[in-house]
Amino acid sequence: MTIIEKRQQIEDAILTLKKLQDEATFEETPEIVEAIVKLTVKKELLVMSEWDNFTLEITDDDFKKLREAKAAIEDTTITEQEKTEKVKKGIAIGKKILGVLKIL
Amino acid sequence: MKKEFISYLLLVSILVIGCSIPAKVKTGSTEIVAAQKKFVEENNRFYDAILSTVSDHVEVTKSYLNEKIQTQISGLPKLYLDKMLKDRKKDKKAGDTATVILSTEDQLLIINTTMKSQETLLNEYHLAVDTLNERKKKIEVVINILKKFQGEIFNAMKSLDTYIQLQKFNEVLWEDTKNLIGGKNDKIDSLIKTIDSLNNN
């Protein structure tokens, strides 16, 4: 994956987390806020030599769940329960990202 | 973008210096003196350009992160209050039309969570600023060493019979300086070793 693609991946993750933040519960929100800020900082501070080794360490399937959660928020055709389930999965990925960022 | 610009700047500078130096010039000729002078001048301009670019980059990044994080921090009290109200509304039984009133516990939870989050985000910002300042300082230190070394190179040049070695030296400098943008300690150590090694040879 190129640096541009990695950067784009981080930006996508930030945008998705911002959407998920709106849907998160009070309890879930602090971690989402923290993940957004940590990703924002990471994106700005990574230097060339570090980009080579950097990965969000989330799978394609995780990203798929993130995108599904983001889409579900705006989807008017699905039930409230379906929406909640997808958002929950997205928030879980957000927490996973935060977990990875905390150990970097 | 800035980093890409630095790489570009370094590469162009090396190419300009490399191309402008003849492959073989006899020691002591007027060409060698002119080439040596040009080498020092070009390199010094190149180092000044790095310092200026790094300094701009650090300030722009600090300002960007400050704005982003401050916006996030100032929005936290309302964000958490709204979240709590939303959650409590969801907790209400069907048909209950009474206005949601937050308990003292809820209010305290909002205040504590807000303060904790603000502290976390502020820490994140301060860490980022420290990293940027440290990175800038390291680059300044190395550039100053390199600038100082220019005089020594200039003198050492008299014993070199070709400029190929000089070009190789510049390539090493280019690689080390490029990595230095990352501000890693081991890179500085490696650069100093390279300088020492070249100086002794």
Image: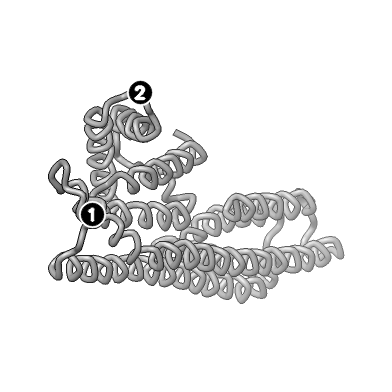
Residue at (21, 57) in percent of width and height? B100
Closest to the observer: A102 or A92? Answer: A92
Q: Label 1 neighbourhood size at 10 Å, few (<14), some (14-19), many (20+)?
A: many
Disc assigned to residue A26: 1
x, y percent for residue B185? 40, 65
Rounded to the nearest whole Å, what is the CA distance between mark 2 and mark 1? 26 Å
* Residue B88: percent from left, percent from top: 19, 53
Dot 1 falls on which chain?
A
Q: Where residue B59 sits in the image (x, y, percent)?
A: 56, 69
Q: What residue sits 47% from the left and 63% below the top? A: B65
Q: Nearer the viewer's eye, disc 2 or disc 1?
A: 2
User: Between residues A80 and B198, which one lies in front from this camera angle?
Assistant: A80
Q: Amino acid at mark 2?
A: Thr
Q: Nearer the viewer, residue B149 or B160?
A: B149
Direction from residue A85 to residue B23 in the image, left or right: right
**Residue at the limit of the structure toward the right, as seen here:** B30
SS type, badge 1: loop
* Residue behind mark 2: A77
First of labels 2, 1 by sequence position: 1
- Callout 2 environment at 10 Å: few (<14), some (14 to 19), or many (20+)? few
Report the amino acid beneath label 1: Phe
B77 in relation to B87, above or below: below
